[in-house]
Amino acid sequence: MPDPAVTERLRQVVDELFHDRLRVTRRDLYSAAAADIHVPAETLALLNEIPEGSYSRGEMLEAIEGAVRDRDEAEREARRPERIVALEDTAEAERAIIGDTTLNALIQGPSGPPPDAPPFREPGE
């Protein structure tokens, strides 16, 4: 979610754009926002996510809010931890049960250091 001060400044840019026009394009908005020193690059990138086209003031504000929502959802999805599945619940385990194989045979990770690791020495040796 953008900083409230940035959001307010962007709203002012939109108001200035629509001062004497009924419709503007995303490109118009981007140009006006890029000319404003108080609108950061992150917000300009957000404006690029708005579909091309001509917008009324209400439609433009709605498109900006939609882009913010979409970005927030994408960031939440990116932060969501990967789902961990127990070995016993995997398809490989099911095949092992059917094939009468032990689950230990499914563990593929080495139990020791990697083969190219230097030998371990205690400090002072």
Image (cartoon, rainbow, N blue to C red):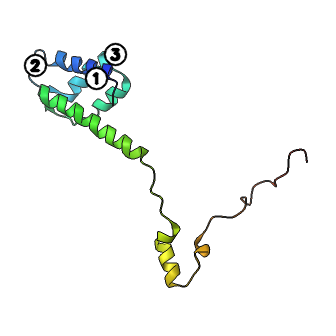
The CA distance from mark 2 to mark 3 is 23 Å
Q: Name the residue under label 3.
A: 38
Q: Nearer the viewer, mark 1 or mark 2?
A: 1
Q: In this view, does 85 lie above or below 102?
A: above
Distance CA(mark 1)–CA(mark 3):
10 Å
Q: Where is residue 107 in the image (x, y as percent from the top left)?
A: 60, 69
Identify the mark nearer the N-term, 1 or 3: 1
Q: Which of marks 2 and 3 is in front?
A: 3
- Secondary structure beneath dot 1 equals helix
Does residue 7 appear to the left or right of 113 in the view shown?
left
The residue at the point 14 percent across, 19 percent down is: 18
Position in image of residue 66 (x %, y %): 23, 36
Question: What's under tag 2, amino acid-wise?
Answer: Arg
Judge from the rendering whether residue 18 lies leftward or rightward of residue 78; answer left or right: left
Image marks 2 and 3: residues in contact by CB distance under 8 Å? no
Residue under numbered circle 2: 21
Q: At 57% from the left edge and 81% from the top edge, which residue is drawn?
A: 101
- Residue under numbered circle 1: 7
Residue 49 appears in view: no
- Front residue of this view, candidates 67 and 49: 67
The three-letter code of the residue at mark 3 reads: His
